[in-house]
Amino acid sequence: MRGSSHDGQLPWIASKFIEQGGAPAPNLRDVLASHRGVVPQDVFLRIGLSLSLALVHAHELGLVHGSVAPRAVLLADDGVRLIGWMTASVDGTDSPHRDLLPLTETYLGGGEVFPESDMYAAGALLLAFPAGSRENPRVGLASRIDPVLLMTLRHCLEHEPARRPSARELAEAFTSAVDGSTSSDTKELDRLFDDLLRMEPLAQEDLLTLGPTLVGRLMTYSNYLANLGEREESLAQAEEAVRVCRELAAEAPQEYATGLGAALNNLSVRLGELGRAEESLAAAFEAREVYEAPGSGPGLAMVLNNLSNRLAAVGRREEALAAAEEAVAVGS
């Protein structure tokens, strides 16, 4: 039911009460907060698929929502419900009430109200879930997402509207991810991720005791992601491991130097995999410096071997040979 637009009052829409488990259905802002920033994979996939299908239906009817944002998406028992249609455009005609629900820059795709602008907003909204943040959906933890789905979501944020996927293409990507979400690799990835979620708040409370364990989990996760070809997400975990190691080393340099060296060496490898040769070399040099400090423990040969590879990658062949020879001498 809707109100008349000819009586001098703002238009209104009455809809069926939307609930989840007998209570008012939460919007996606509340869902993200209730899961402390990172929702379970099955919830993320269900929300993404349902929202994509809602946009498919709307766009096929000539409707462009125009204000897709967390507050406009409710999570009901049987999927999501897209509300806030008073700002929608119909068959290319914009609503005169768009200023009722102004959007932040996060969900704006250039300001024009077209199906492609809905896709920009949907991509930004959905990427906030694995990122754990609404403020910057381009950056964050997206490592549990199927690579094809992740690429499709990131294409939603393309500057050129024509390069963004359609709602149907996004729905198809979510469908494929749902169908493949029970693979052994995905299960192991979920296990590692859930382990990290449990460990991170504990390590924050007792860094010196649990920080080294967290670093080990981060590096294991990083290596696992690298083996699956998810290199950017692997790098993100390697960077986090280095960050935690620096905090530990600041508290007790002698005790945690070896951990920092190992984390830097791992970061160097991950950067190299992404073709960031100079950054990779810088991390390798710092790793060697850490390992050469007194009391740093074993592992120098491994670091020198990596340094040799990084030097060769930037054409510094004589230095690469010298590092390789030193690695042999140290390891023998």
Image (tube, rainbow, N blue to C red):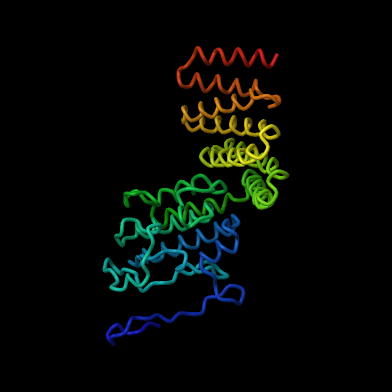
User: Is residue 173 positioned above or below 254 on the image?
Assistant: below
What residue do we see at 68% from left, 46% from top?
207
Tell me: 192 left or right of 90.
right
Q: Which residue is situated farthest in the right direction here?
A: 209
What residue do we see at 46% from left, 58% from top?
125
Instruction: Locate residue 213, reporting x and y percent.
Output: 70, 42
User: Is residue 138 positioned above or below 104 on the image?
Assistant: above
**In the rendered picture of this protein, how many numbered marks are placed on residues?**
0
Tell me: 216 left or right of 319.
right
Residue 293, located in which quarter of the rendered image? Answer: top right
Instruction: Locate residue 208, reporting x and y percent.
Output: 70, 43
Instruction: Locate residue 51, reporting x and y percent.
Output: 47, 62
Q: Nearer the viewer, residue 155 or 321?
A: 321
Q: Which residue is situated farthest in the bottom direction here?
A: 7
User: Is residue 273 positioned above or below 37 on the image?
Assistant: above
Instruction: Locate residue 271, reporting x and y percent.
Output: 51, 32
What residue do we see at 36% from left, 49% from top?
158
What residue do we see at 68% from left, 24% from top?
294
Q: Nearer the viewer, residue 319 or 140?
A: 319
Tell me: 15 left or right of 295.
left
User: Is residue 316 positioned above or below 221 on the image?
Assistant: above
Picture quarter with the C terminus: top right
Picture quarter with the N terminus: bottom left
